[in-house]
Image: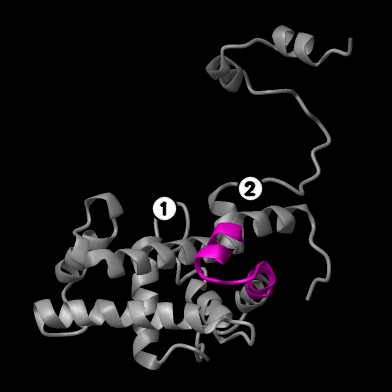
């Protein structure tokens, strides 16, 4: 386990701050989770969750993949082992009871909604039925007042899914992060980028020239 943050880790820690506040987590918890998360990428595919029950685990994996599905650019949230990341955070010794209750309560809310509407759990509902429930909570500005608990849970879950995915190697590659890479030749700002900004290299040189 690393003991010091390099530049990429420091940027990542700053990016995780909003998620930490929303889930009542510390940045140190998120950093430990990210390290275990990176280690987990080389583990066998079978994982035994420490926090989630078997039923919750199925829901978490399905919901995470609705948020970040597999596409032509990268794998899905479960491919990046985001559920394992969440499980570590919530089973960590420093995890707060409020964050555990928020997660369990939200997953139970999903099941309750599906049982009330369709007579079965979220995982066992049809694809169209699950999307119907998610459409009701994924857009806060359009959500009905009675959906407020589901909206709050989904917002938090979506944030946690994103923090987990973009803490993984797959996530960094997805955004085409190229930091911490030696570049022996700098040819300047690409012409298309300069054109978009409406400036020329001569203008840039004038702005940065010492007085």
Query: Residue 72's mark?
Result: 1
The quarter of the image holding the N terminus is bottom right
Q: Can residue 85 be seen in this view?
A: yes
Is residue 30 a member of the stretch shown in magenta? yes
Residue beneath the point at 24% across and 81% down = 111
Mark 1 vs 2, N-terminal side: 1
Residue beneath the point at 47% across and 57% down = 74
State the image coordinates of residue 159 (x, y, percent, origin top left): 46, 61
Q: Is 42 drawn above or below residue 51 in the view shown?
A: above
Q: Nearer the viewer, residue 147 or 197?
A: 147
Query: Residue 162's mark?
Result: none
State the image coordinates of residue 210 (x, y, percent, origin top left): 88, 13
Secondary element under disc 1, as helix, strand or loop, is loop
Most prominent secondary structure in the magenta stretch? helix
Q: Is 82 drawn above or below residue 119 in the view shown?
A: above
Do the residues bearing badges 1 and 2 touch, measured as CB atoms within 8 Å?
no
State the image coordinates of residue 117 (x, y, percent, origin top left): 10, 76
State the image coordinates of residue 49 (x, y, percent, origin top left): 50, 89
Residue 74 horizontal side relative to residue 133, left or right: right
Residue beneath the point at 58% across and 53% down = 173
Q: Which of 42 and 99 is in front in this view?
A: 99
Which quadrant holds residue 31?
bottom right
Magenta span = 17-33
Residue 131 horizontal side relative to residue 167, left or right: left
Secondary element under disc 2, as helix, strand or loop, is loop
Is residue 172 a member of the stretch shown in magenta? no
Name the residue beneath numbered marker 2. 177
Q: Can residue 131 be seen in this view?
A: no
Residue lying furthest right: 211
Which quadrant holds residue 205?
top right
Q: Nearer the viewer, mark 1 or mark 2?
A: 2
């Amino acid at each position: 386990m690393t003991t010091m943050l390099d530049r990429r880790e420091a940027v990542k820690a700053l990016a995780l701050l909003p998620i930490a506040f929303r889930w009542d987590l510390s940045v140190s918890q998120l950093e430990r989770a990210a390290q275990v998360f990176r280690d987990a990428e080389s583990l066998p595919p079978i994982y035994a969750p420490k926090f989630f029950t078997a039923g919750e685990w199925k829901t978490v994996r399905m919901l995470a993949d609705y948020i970040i599905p597999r596409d032509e650019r990268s794998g899905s949230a479960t491919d990046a082992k985001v559920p394992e990341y969440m499980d570590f955070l919530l089973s960590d010794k420093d995890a707060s009871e409020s964050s555990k209750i928020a997660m369990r309560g939200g997953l139970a809310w999903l099941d309750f909604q599906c049982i009330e509407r369709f007579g079965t759990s979220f995982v066992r509902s049809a694809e169209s039925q699950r999307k119907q429930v998610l459409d009701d909570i994924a857009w806060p500005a359009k959500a009905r007042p009675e959906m407020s608990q589901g909206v709050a849970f989904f917002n938090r879950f979506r944030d946690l899914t994103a923090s987990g995915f973009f803490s993984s190697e797959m996530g960094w590659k997805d955004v085409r992060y190229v930091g911490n890479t030696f570049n022996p030749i700098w040819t300047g700002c690409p012409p298309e980028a300069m054109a978009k900004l409406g400036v020329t290299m001569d203008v840039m040189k004038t702005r940065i020239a010492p007085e």
